[in-house]
Image (cartoon, rainbow, N blue to C red):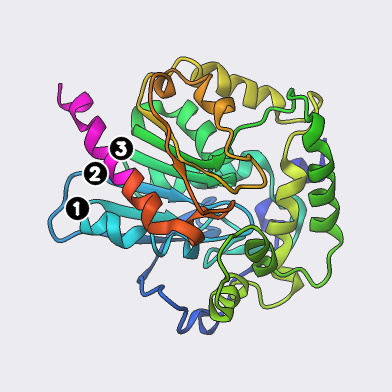
Amino acid sequence: MTKADTMTMEDLRVLRTPESRFENLPDYPFEPHYVAVDQGRLRMHYVDEQPVTPSGETVVLLHGNPSWSYLYRHVIPPLVAAGHRCVAVDLIGFGKSDKLADRHAYTYDRHIGWLREAVFDGLDLREVTMVCHDWGGALGLPLLAAHPERFRRVVAANTGLSTGDEDLGAGWPMMATWLQSSQRTHPFEPSAIVDAMTVTDLDPAVLAAYDAPYPDESYLTGIRQFPLLIPISPQDEYTPALRAAWDVLETLELPFLCAFSDQDNVTHGDHTALSARIPGAQGRTHPTITGAGHFLQEDAGPALAAVVEEFIRSTAKEYAA
């Protein structure tokens, strides 16, 4: 039994980033919204932008590590202009959501549970179009497997779902480097990761926005813990649950699109780990977003929005039939 198994939320110290840290963020005019999760102990932030003339579509945008909903600031406005409601969640430990001082409180299962509570129990979202990136896919895809009836379609962007059964092969050196640097770098600046994994030169104010949620090291526990939750062997404690998720994903016919970028040094644009296994992805033309690194929302946010909008329009008839 692990420390996280025996720990109760009453034992944990919850940190909340001061609102002053989020003042005057460039291109992020969105009003904050909050939903309580974990029996009301934690506050989870989300952006909820709704169009004047709704299309009836709800797009849920899930970020990864070490970003937050700020990542989607150039994706949201075009989708709202097209008539779609956009909900961008900050995972617990990230952005404007609460953080936990004890890193061992962050587990794979808890992250999925908090996300489920927010979007389904709290917001009661249905017929969702999910856009997931990085860890947003590693959490969102098991959520899809558990509740496929809540979803209409998925756009996966530079993400995947590892079980620990995969042969890391040539990818192991990069994984080992990331595991080491995520634990040993001090000071740890999330902006440095985003900057290193984008193609464009980011403005200093934009980089500062990625660091804004974390006034000091105590707020970074969620970011530091995420790399250690990636299953890298079949003996990982969460491997059985992820295998079970794949058992469902490999049967799903709902429309599934991969929108990977050409200069992602994580996936190298290869989406076949998803597109070759999920029935709803097969037989589709999966676009490559050019001129973009891992954080493609920074390099080509409007282009990703256009892909999502086209996918919604082109698959709407599948639900109207």
Determine whether the residue tagged by mark 2 lies in a helix, strand or loop.
loop
Residue where numbered disc 1 is placed: 83
Q: Is residue 44 visible?
A: no
For the residue pair 70 and 34, the one nearer the viewer reads as: 70
Q: Which residues are magenta?
A: 308-321
Residue where numbered disc 3 is placed: 311
Disc 2 and disc 3 in contact, CB within 8 angstroms: no
Disc 1 and disc 2 in contact, CB within 8 angstroms: yes
Instruction: Give me the residue at 30% from left, 37% from top.
Output: 311
Q: Nearer the viewer, mark 2 or mark 3?
A: 3
Magenta run includes residue 161: no
- Residue 103, given in percent of the width and then of the height, sits at 75, 56
- Residue 92, given in percent of the width and then of the height, sits at 58, 56
Q: Amino acid at mark 2?
A: Glu
Counting residues from the start of the chain, the first of labels 1 and 2 encountered is 2
- Residue 320, given in percent of the width and then of the height, sits at 15, 26
